[in-house]
Image (tube, rainbow, N blue to C red):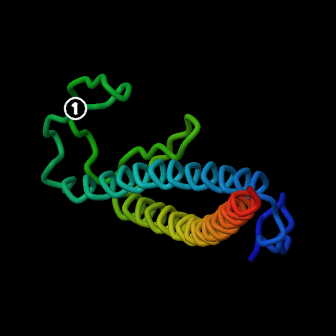
Amino acid sequence: MASQDGPQLQQVDLTKLSLPQLTQLRQQLDQELSVFQESLQTLKIAQQKFQDSGDSLEKITPKAEGNPILVPLTGSMYVPGRIADANSVIVDVGTGYFVQKDIDGAKDYFRRKVNYVTEQMEKIQVLGLEKSKIRDAVMDVVEIKFQAQLQLQEAAAAAAAEKS
């Protein structure tokens, strides 16, 4: 069984760890799994936003020029406007930078972003699955050690009762 200790992968025999060490390892794995879940949720939101942005571009055709549109100023504030040029759009590429692209270029940009985010999600899912398997193995060893400790206590109690 393996445990990740810092950037180096290190083999650890779980059966040689004490119950407190196993409990600490389980808690660490629980925290890591929680971080993976939060990361997946964040990436899923980003993926959906990129997908929605790409889908919105399908509605912009040369016939749409001059049509009314709501322009976002912030995440919750929009102002009315009109489509001035239906052949190009301004794309937010992050950290306050915007790029003017033609419709096909913008569609390609959002498609690539969706693919990239999807790849990252798949990587995190694989890591999460590995951590989950390790956590399950730790829980199995904790259960075995707990049962062994319980049997020792019962045997000691039986021996003490026999002597009296």
Residue beneath the point at 36% across and 49% down: 49
- Drawn side of residue 104 relative to residue 95, left or right: left
Q: Nearer the viewer, residue 101 or 19?
A: 19
47 is higher (above) or lower (below) than 145: above
- Drawn side of residue 47 relative to residue 116, left or right: left
Residue behind mark 1: 70
Q: Which of 69 and 32 is in front in this view?
A: 32
Query: Residue 65, image x and y in percent?
Result: 18, 45
| Mark 1 crowdedness (10 Å alpha carbons): few <14, some 14-19, many ≥20 | few
Residue beneath the point at 55% across and 70% down: 129
Q: Nearer the viewer, residue 140 or 99?
A: 140
Query: Residue 30, image x and y in percent?
Result: 60, 52
Query: Residue 9, image x and y in percent?
Result: 83, 70
- Drawn side of residue 24 relative to residue 84, left or right: right
Q: Looking at the rendering, which quadrant does residue 147 occupy?
A: bottom right
Residue beneath the point at 47% across and 48% down: 42
- Drawn side of residue 122 relative to residue 55, left or right: right
Identity, as a three-letter code, of the amino acid under mark 1? Leu
Can you say which quadrant of the picture contains the C terminus? bottom right
Query: Residue 66, image x and y in percent?
Result: 16, 39
Q: Looking at the rendering, which quadrant does residue 74 occupy?
A: top left
